[in-house]
Image (cartoon, rainbow, N blue to C red):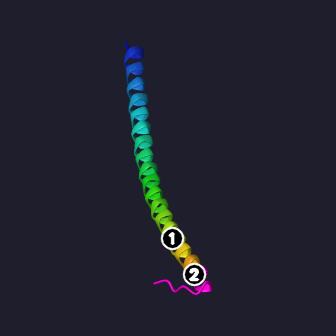
Amino acid sequence: MQKVDRNERVLNENLQRLNKMVVDEINQMHTHIDSVMMINENIQQIQRGIEECQHTFEILVDAFLHAQEGVIQP
């Protein structure tokens, strides 16, 4: 009977340790997911900024080309 009690105790301890490990891993995954989401938001903001810069550059190039032709652009 002592062996059964010991085995149950060992099993219980190992299950508790496994549960703690799983909870820690899940928490770590949530942290990583939050980081990835924040990085994705930052990338989208950078992409919008680059697109705006590109658009402004295209406007400047058009204005320069028209200015060479003697046409003033607003």
Instruction: State which region is magenta.
Output: 64-74
Q: Residue at x 46, y 65 (%)?
A: 48
Q: Which of these two is toward me, 59 or 26?
A: 59
Q: Residue furthest top?
A: 1
Question: Is residue 67 in the magenta section?
Answer: yes
Amino acid type, residue under disc 2 in the picture: His
Residue toward you, 6 or 38:
38
Residue 71 falls left or right of residue 27: right
Residue 1 horizontal/vertical position (percent): 37, 12
Q: Quadrant of the C terminus?
A: bottom left
Q: Is residue 71 left or right of residue 28?
A: right
- The earlier-in-sequence mark between 1 and 2 is 1
Q: Residue at x 46, y 56 (%)?
A: 40
Q: CA distance from mark 1 to mark 2?
A: 17 Å
Label for residue 66?
A: 2
Q: Establish if 62 lies above or below 19.
A: below
Asked if marks 1 and 2 touch (Cβ < 8 Å), the reply is no
**Tag 1 residue:** 55
Q: Position of residue 55 (x, y in %)?
A: 51, 70
Q: Answer whether residue 36 is magenta in the image.
A: no
Near mark 2 (Cα within 10 A), the count class, few <14, some 14-19 or many ≥20, is few
Q: Depth check: give the residue in front, 2 or 47.
A: 47
Image quadrant in which you'd find residue 12 = top left
Say which residue appears at 42% left-offset and 34% top-offset. Answer: 17
